[in-house]
Image (spheres, grey):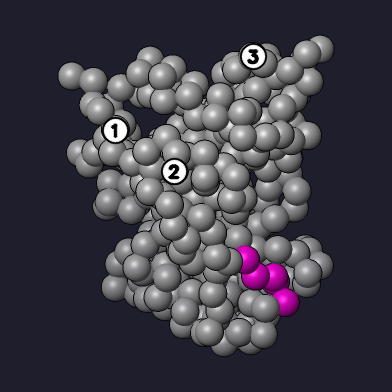
Amino acid sequence: MEIVGISNDNLTNFSQLLGEDMSEDVSRVYYNGIGALGDDDEVLGALVYELLDSESEEDTRSRICFMKAADKEVSAGLENYYTHNSLEEEVEEVAESFYELTEEMGAETLSEAGFSFGKKEDDVLMVTLADLAASKLGSKKSLPGYVGNIDELSILQFREAVKEILFKGHKGVMEDIPYLPKNWFDGRLSSCIISGGRIPGLFLIRRTKSGMLIPALLFAYGPERKMDLIHMIRYSLQQALKAYPPETKVMIYRKNASIRALADNILPNRSGEEIFFGTRKEQLQL
């Protein structure tokens, strides 16, 4: 068995195991993949982790978000490479690792390597466009003319709008928002507030390779920010229902208290799936 880092050079070997969406994520900033190969380059398993807070004043953490293996020997090999190669050579400032996994074997392997072992409700909430259409924000109300989509913005306007929001301390649910180009988001669905040449509100939505919709950033500032947030959500939902079937999946990352509160308000009594979860303190390399 050979354990290798997953790169653009060998990504096609692992794409079937990873799936369309995770294969795309592996190529993003802050995401890294590790793969296991057997005889004749047979794919035996893979592990994907994401670095969090690597450019902030907070301690850097590593989130293991994917781990699938043919057996415990393979999963142990992936964990060993992660600990003794990835952490020591690539991300020397990681203070803590944690995993969020749906499969028990990977969680058990990590717990045997020093991680805690438990279960929790997933921060991710999976719903459909039909669910959102039936919510309190699904009513077809007319919207003010200053609400539009990001297709109306130039690349410079888009970058300046994102930069201003980041400067105000809001980065959305994706660590690499500063590096994602305008065309990475669905331009028809992603909405904005246009006011006096300024863009004081953005609601960015990603449509993945598999067709799933992911709200990535929702923020507005100024005296009308609360209503602007509602206007943008309604606009994006109306556009999504025009463009995609009602069964289209929407992945809502309840990454912080404000997003969780908003999700609870729009979709009360909805909960995430139960997943495996554990943490491990890492030895910082000084």
Q: What secondary structure is found at the residue carrying circle 1?
A: loop
**Is residue 95 shown left or right of residue 21?**
left
Determine whether the residue tagged by mark 2 lies in a helix, strand or loop.
helix
Name the residue that disc number 2 marks: 111
> Which residue is at a point 55% across and 65% down the rendered structure image?
274
Q: Is the C-beta separation of discs 1 and 3 under 8 Å?
A: no
Cα separation between marks 1 and 3: 25 Å
Percent position of residue 24, x then y? 65, 35
Q: How many marks?
A: 3
Sequence order check, earlier mark of 1 and 3: 3
**Which residue type carries mark 3?**
Glu
Q: Quadrant of the C terminus?
A: top left
Q: Main secondary structure of the magenta part?
A: strand
At a point 74% along the width and 71% down the height, the residue shown is 241
Residue lying at 70% horizontally and 19% vertically, measured from the top left: 37
Residue 31 screen position, x and y as percent? 50, 32
Which residues are drawn in magenta? 125-130
Instruction: Give the residue type that dot 1 points to.
Output: Glu
Number of the label disc, if any, that sits on residue 282: 1
Residue 7 is inside the magenta segment: no
Q: Residue 2: which disc?
A: 3
Could you give the CA–CA distance between mark 2 and mark 3, rounded to whole angstroms?
23 Å
> Is 129 contained in the magenta span?
yes
Q: Given this view, does label 1 or label 2 mark the residue nearer the observer?
A: 2
Q: Residues within 10 Å of mark 3 (few under 14, many from 20)?
A: some
Per the image, label 3 sits on a secondary structure element best described as: strand
Q: Residue 219, relative to residue 264: is it above or below?
A: above
